Amino acid sequence: MKIKVLTTFPEMIRPVVSQSILGRAMENGLISIEAIDIRPYAENKHHNTDDYPFGGGAGMVMMAQPIVSAFREAQGEDFKGKRIYMSPKGQTLTQKKAEELAKEPELIFLCGHYEGVDQRAIDLCIDEELSIGDYVLTGGEMAALVVIDAVARLIPGVLGSEESPVDESFSSGLLEYPQYTRPRSFEGMEVPEVLLSGNHALINKWRREESIRITYERRPEMLSGIELNKKERAFLDALIREKEEGDNNHADD
């Protein structure tokens, strides 16, 4: 996969993507990530990329011309992928969305700054707007990095283990079960015995039930779309009854 990030602060992107799993994936030729500075594409004397908004108001707006020129060179003539503007007005990133983007051969991200981007640049260059949550950042760079990380790790070979992205939170529709490693005992806390049993059927059952329990406790709305077998449904019903009984006891106090 080819990923390009159009930004006025490329130094915010380059050091991050060169590290850890993303860095190794680039070294191994699994992905390429390029940060492109928008400023050299500005045709004005001082290479400014922002100006005052028409109609007045606080702050500055990123100009259409440098962005459009940068996009046209970045995508070339045979671009086949998605062009994404990181914006709080966009669709919220989910695991499903990351999986969709991971199937694209190329992605180009536009990182906004100041009070936003001239709408004409969005109309000419952007296929979709994407948000990482209901809050506002000082720029789109960190948001783009979140999306890049979520997408890149789904590309075969990037994580090194094909099972890793399947078992994680949200991939199965449930939050992930607890994980443990050595030592078996730490500050009086023990690893659950089932994980030491060597019985993979029991281990898988425990992990599934723990995922159901944690999802019910923290994100119960996610369970509405999950298909549970009879035993899993009974386990969830028991959790619900236990919570209701606890709530009733607190109400009586």
Image (cartoon, rainbow, N blue to C red):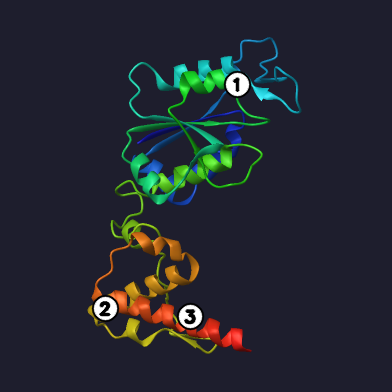
Q: Earlier in the sequence, mark 1 or mark 3?
A: 1
Of circles 2 and 1, which is in front?
2
Amino acid under label 2? Lys
Q: Quick one: quadrant of the C terminus? A: bottom right
Residue 29: percent from left, percent from top: 34, 39
**Relative to 102, 40 lies left or right:** right
Residue 221: percent from left, percent from top: 44, 62
Of circles 2 and 3, which is in front?
3
Q: Secondary structure at mark 2?
A: helix
Label 1 and label 3: CA atoms lie apart by 51 Å
Q: Label 3 crowding class (10 Å Cα cut-off): few <14, some 14-19, many 20+?
A: few
Residue 190: percent from left, percent from top: 46, 87
At 60% from the left and 38% from the top, the residue drawn is 12
Q: Are marks 2 and 3 in contact (CB under 8 Å)?
A: no
Q: Are marks 2 and 1 in contact (CB under 8 Å)?
A: no
Residue highlighted by disc 3? 243
Amino acid under label 3? Lys
Q: Are marks 1 and 3 in contact (CB under 8 Å)?
A: no
The answer to which of 40 and 71 lies nearer the viewer is 71
Q: Is residue 176 visible?
A: yes
Task: Give the vertical position of 228 relative to 21 (above or below).
Answer: below
Mark seen at residue 118: 1
Residue 231: percent from left, percent from top: 26, 78
Residue highlighted by disc 2? 231
